[in-house]
Image (cartoon, rainbow, N blue to C red):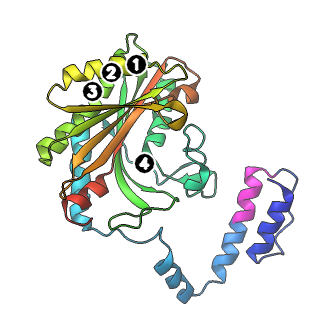
Amino acid sequence: MDKKILNRIVTRSGVPDLPEILSDRLTESDLNTLLLEVFHRRSKVKSPAVLLQNYRNNRFVQPVAADAVGLSGFLLDWLTSAATAGFTPLELSPVCPLGTCSIIATAHQNKVVSALRGTEVVADATNVLALESAVRRQREGFPTETRHFSAVHRHVRAQEVPDMPGYSPHFSILGLTSAGRDKGGFDFEKENLWRHIHFYRSFLEDNMHLSPIKLRLISLRGESGDNRMFDMMHEFLREKLFDLTVETAPTARKEQAYYCDVQFKIVIPMPDGGEMEIADGGFTDWTRQLTGNRKERLLISGIGLELLYKMTNGLL
């Protein structure tokens, strides 16, 4: 970080007598030391009245506008169902390594609540599940068996949220990941795309009695416009989901750089007659980036459980 920028940080912090730790290129340890001292001194001069005012005005710290017992039971039902479907449940830390969303994915770091000690607040559980998948699969020598993980997690995101009832900077989602090896013939992709979509559809229809459910399958085209994997997935799902409406749409790869080749969305009916895209997923190259192994494959998906709970309980 530039020394002039850090000098401005020190000046604005109100503690100009900080120890001289500035250099042309600060290490992460130096930056932690600086910011820890800044936050320590700022917290010391806060009064209880100011603390209460901060709590009242800070959008990131407000409690959820929903029944805590009802919402917790709803989240547990989904997590239990995911475990029954073969997705190993994990209880994730509230924080993850700094850059978890911006290094392997496309989210800007400003959309994440960055923290100290080399961490950030979890903004997307599937990124963390990708890290865990990479660690375990690399340790095990990249086995042929696919690892399926699930996590219910409260995300915190720093971008502006819609000024509408039910929306908040922090919210609970269920994230699913399937990490494995390229089997040839798009077999990994077929098996796991079906696994994710079938799980969401089954719970929404059988447990929540929501219908009609729609599937939106999106082709993320390369420069040539051809997408062989999408064509294979579309044909495969039309046979497997003959009784489900499958809508397709192309999107230029440069317009959607988060997923690779294929993205899907689960669409549910709203009480007012409209529709809501409640689940989203697709293939990524994250485990390939993390491990350097070109044969690794990863499918991620997530569903907005808190939004779904609020919708079905008249809180939107």
Q: Earlier in the sequence, mark 1 or mark 4?
A: 4
* Main SS, magenta residues: helix
Residues at marks 4 and 2, CA–CA distance in whole angstroms: 31 Å
Q: Nearer the viewer, residue 196 or 230?
A: 230
Secondary structure state at the residue bearing disc 1: helix
Query: In what quadrant of the picture does the C terminus appear?
Result: bottom left
In the image, residue 182 lies at what x, y percent?
A: 43, 16
Describe the element under mark 2 as helix, strand or loop.
Answer: helix
Residue topped by disc 1: 229
- Which residue bears the numbered disc 3? 194
Mark 1 and mark 4 residues within 8 Å of each other at the beta carbon: no
Q: Quadrant of residue 307?
A: bottom left
Counting from the top left corner in percent of width and height, residue 159 is at 52, 59
Crowding around mark 1 (Cα neighbors within 10 Å: few <14, some 14 to 19, many 20+) is some
Amino acid on which disc 1 is placed = Met
- Label 1, label 2: how many angstroms apart (C-alpha)? 6 Å
Marks 4 and 3, Cα distance to the nearest angstrom?
26 Å
Counting other residues with Cα less than 10 Å from the Cα at mark 3, is it few (<14), some (14-19), or many (20 or more)? some
